[in-house]
Amino acid sequence: GQQVMQIPQYQHVQEGEDFTTYCNSSTTLSNIQWYKQRPGGHPVFLIQLVKSGEVKKQKRLTFQFGEAKKNSSLHITATQTTDVGTYFCAGPWGFKTIFGAGTRLFVKA
Amino acid sequence: EAQVTQNPRYLITVTGKKLTVTCSQNMNHEYMSWYRQDPGLGLRQIYYSMNVEVTDKGDVPEGYKVSRKEKRNFPLILESPSPNQTSLYFCASRGMTYNEQFFGPGTRLTVL
């Protein structure tokens, strides 16, 4: 079946450092979504990417969708303590939704 | 306020005692899902429903049942819970034209 691999599993950064999480699918995706889950909270939708090679920005967050539509990345510039949490990518497989295992971000002030 | 609600938020039960976790959304969404979240495994889809009376298995459906008799409600039923179903459960909903899913607050289930 389809798999969505996400790395790294954990990332510790000093406040102000950059952070990147990568998502790789075993199959071509029609679209990919990114979610953020704060500690103790529920996943919250961040963005959806649809087009090959697409790049979208939300303030300090930059999202990319690969040319082959099999990989994606989320980059945070100059992390802040408010960025802590787990970041998930998710893609469709038929009518199912497959999530990556997530990258947990720790930010040290 | 647009939201997905789940009840109960916390539940401790014993092996074999049937339980139901309710889920309700007020956004008139067609698509609803149940996920379980376990450390290191991310979110795994249990069941999903594309509309009333239309349900299908996700990746980890064993030991679970669902029903969709009304558009707004999508209960998760564990007829004979076992300790390996101890997990954090999320209900989610979305419309059919855009993939943004709205998640409920979660239900932390412990099966002893």
Image (tube, coloured by chain):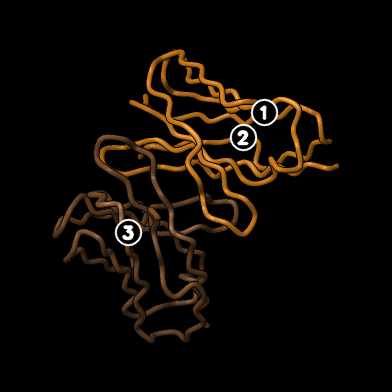
Chain colours: A orange, B brown
Question: SS class of the residue under badge 2?
Answer: strand
Front label number (3 vs 2)? 3
Q: Chain of mark 2?
A: A
Question: SS class of the residue under badge 3?
Answer: strand
Q: Which residue is mark 2?
A: A7
Task: Determine crowd level at label 3: few under 14, some 14-19, many 20+ residues with C-alpha closer than 10 A.
Answer: many
Task: Inspect the image, locate mark 1, and give the three-letter code of the amino acid beneath it.
Answer: Ile
Q: Which residue is mark 3?
A: B25
Distance from disc 3 to disc 2, alpha carbons, whole Å, reads: 32 Å
Task: Inspect the image, locate mark 2, and give the three-letter code of the amino acid beneath it.
Answer: Ile
Q: Quadrant of the N terminus of chain A?
A: top left
Front label number (1 vs 3)? 3
Q: Chain of mark 1?
A: A
Name the outermost residue toward the front. B1
Disc number at residue A76? 1
Res A75 visible? no
Question: SS class of the residue under badge 1?
Answer: strand
In-image side of B4 versus A66 (left or right): left
Image coordinates of residue B91 in percent, x first then y, are: 39, 59
Q: In the image shown, does B55 or A42 lie closer to the viewer?
A: A42
Q: In the image shown, does A56 or A59 lie closer to the viewer?
A: A59
Q: Is residue A13 shown above or below A78?
A: below
Task: Determine crowd level at label 1: few under 14, some 14-19, many 20+ residues with C-alpha closer than 10 A.
Answer: many
Task: Inspect the image, locate mark 3, and give the three-letter code of the amino acid beneath it.
Answer: Gln
Distance from disc 1 to disc 2, alpha carbons, whole Å, reads: 15 Å
